[in-house]
Amino acid sequence: MNTTKKAIAMVLAALALAAPLCAETEDGSATNAEARRNAAPGPAGKALYRSSRAGIVMCKGDGGAIAVADMRAEPTEIADVTEKISRFLSSYVEARRVELAPGGAAGLQGAVAAAFAERAKEGTCAVIAIADCGAEAPGLAVFPEDRVAVVNASRLAAGADAGLYEKRLGKEIWRGVAFALGGYASEHPCALKAVDSLADLDNECLHMTCPPVNFKAMDFARKAGVAPYGPVPYGMAVRRGVAPAPTNELQRAVWEAVKADMATNAAEAQR
């Protein structure tokens, strides 16, 4: 029973942390639930009412990003990993390609310098760099006070084919994000299991964080200014300017109605 209650409490906590995505924006527009109750026959009411039926899209809220900066000489696709972390932590994680400055410091020193330069950019709340630091450099270097981590891709390639290398890389990105967001070594099945070797990374670590680490990281992300990330109705995404182009007639109707309502509100505000 205690385990069940804890699980329910964790789910409720996750919903509370994700609430800013569905809560009202600063312009005072109604929440989706309130809009359905008070939907007027005008375009705005109809659009907001139909928006949930027009589909749910993943959307970032207001705030900065956790940047996963790929600095490798031969980068591979990491967007699927960053999207998974974004969804799991309800916090916006962005994949970036960063070119190391020619003539700069090599190895771990150069990667750390580039990671801190990326961290200094506006809207960047944390940086997890992936770099070729050499076999002698640490596998994962973390600077928790600065919310910076460096994953040494060179170490991950030892004795691995392409598939195993990508699995190791995905786990180390998870570990870098979690440690940079105040995580700690966990004894639960988790990406943050204690690792003393690549064998531990392969066999002991999961591709995600466990609930205790997860909720701590989510809370830390909010305090750090990271944008919430999660599902919102299509109409709300249109209103925020982050919706993908409509793909069917219902989405097109919502798109046009919300845009028309926004234009009307803007014109009235200028009177």
Image: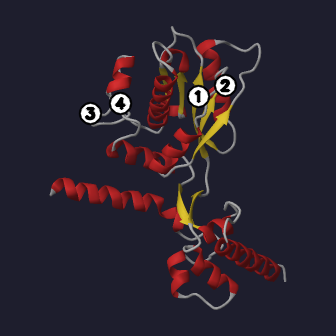
Badge nearest the viewer, 4 or 1: 4
Q: Position of residue 258 (x, y in %)?
A: 70, 76
Question: Nearer the N terminus, badge 3 or badge 1?
Answer: 1
* Residue at the image position 47 percent from the left and 13 percent from the top: 158
Label whose residue precedes the other's in the sequence (3 or 4): 3
**Cα distance in 3D space between marks 3 and 1:** 26 Å
Name the front one of labels 2 and 4.
Answer: 4
Q: CA distance from mark 3 to mark 4?
A: 10 Å
Determine crowd level at label 4: few under 14, some 14-19, many 20+ residues with C-alpha closer than 10 A: many
Residue at point 39%, 18% (across, down)? 198
Label 1 packing within 10 angstroms: few (<14), some (14-19), many (20+): many
Tell me which numbered mark, 4 or 1, is placed earlier along the sequence. 1
Q: Earlier along the polypeptide chain: callout 2 or callout 3? A: 2
Up/down of 236 relative to 231, above or below: below
Circle on res. 187: 3
The residue beneath circle 2 is 114
As helix, strand or loop, the secondary structure at mark 4 comes to loop
* 164 sits to left or right of 225: left
Q: CA distance from mark 4 to mark 1?
A: 20 Å
Which residue position is annotated with label 1?
A: 129
Q: Position of residue 115 (x, y in %)?
A: 63, 28
Q: Quadrant of residue 109?
A: top right
